[in-house]
Amino acid sequence: MIIMLKRQADERQVNNLTSWLKSMGFDIHFSQGASHTIMGLIGDTSRVDIDVIKSLGIVENVQRIQEPYKSANRKFHEEDSIVEVGAGLKIGGGHFQVIAGPCSVESEEQIVLVAKAVKAAGAGLLRGGAFKPRTSPYAFQGLHEEGIRLLLEAKRQSGLPIVTEIMDAHHLKYFEDVDVIQVGARNMQNFELLKELGQLRKPILLKRGLANTIQEWLMSAEYIMAGGNEQVILCERGIRTYETATRNTLDLSAVPVLHKLTHLPVIVDPSHATGIASLVKPMAVAGAACGADGLMIEVHNDPTHARSDGAQSLTPEAFQDVMNAVNAVRPFACR
């Protein structure tokens, strides 16, 4: 349920209303818009008499919300959320960012070289896998805490904030200096992990699950936000369908749908979606054109010899070409 207050609502009356609603067991989310203040009631509102609330002098309108996600719901928060990373870098609300880097951190030379290259091309954040979830137990699993150390060294040399994936809450001690923690597709519904991340006050990049609906995805974001961490970035990375021509099927329709349903920033990962380097550019441009708040693109200095996902990784030169195309289309993006 949302309660829209009148523009000149008396502060004392607002406090009295807040106290009364909290005494009934509701959590309340306040959103200050350009013209209205909205109170979002979180809890079982079936026992609330809407007519009684409407009769209050400070209330302009009351509306029941059917969607099970509340904190992530745009009806509770009309303005776009802007997630701040590091010293002033912003994602969402008109701020577009590109996250780029290798699938896996392999060596200091590799990650530093790629970091400097993607920064020169215009990327705002560096990605790199230290803990790698792989389908085969025999595949390269990442360098773990050593990988994070190398990411931090690349950050020191390039100045780029870092994004890397967490697989287990027990690894949180290694992520203290990581700027954005990524939750991969396989962990989108690892609810115990999401609860732990909700206790942090650090940006979380939440990827869509392999075959999850948009509502399920938003409910996973709700797990993080219910813990008090509202710095959530959604990442569309393709879903599993019957099609086999690409690694996954990139659901670009999810971008405008999400912008309608939620205030959270939405970015697109064309690398994991297609699995084919030659398809990254058209899908990156399409992602920017349909209104995404950013992109996540895999870049490797030597894709042929990459220890993971070389087939979908761009060279630094190819990444520069993608950035040129994306920057050309962004002024015409649909939002």
Image (cartoon, rainbow, N blue to C red):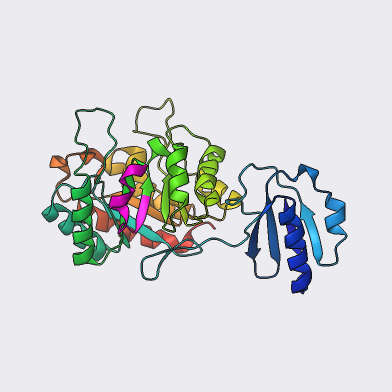
- From which residue to which does the magenta span run? 169-181
Which corner quadrant of the image does residue 98 belong to?
bottom left
Above or below: residue 179 compared with residue 211: below
| Direction from residue 267 to residue 119 in the image, left or right | left
Above or below: residue 11 compared with residue 252: below
**Camera sees residue 219:** yes
Q: Answer whether residue 139 is magenta in the image.
A: no
Residue extending farthest to the front is: 23
Q: Using the image as rendered, state which of residue 24 and residue 176 is in the foreground.
A: 24
Q: How many marks?
A: 0
Indicate the quadrant containing the C terminus: top left, top right, bottom left or bottom right: bottom right
**Camera sees residue 235:** no
Residue extending farthest to the top is: 242
Residue drawn 23% across the image and 52% down it: 148
| Direction from residue 293 to residue 174 in the image, left or right | left
Residue drawn 56% across the image and 52% down it: 259
Which corner quadrant of the image does residue 236 belong to?
top left
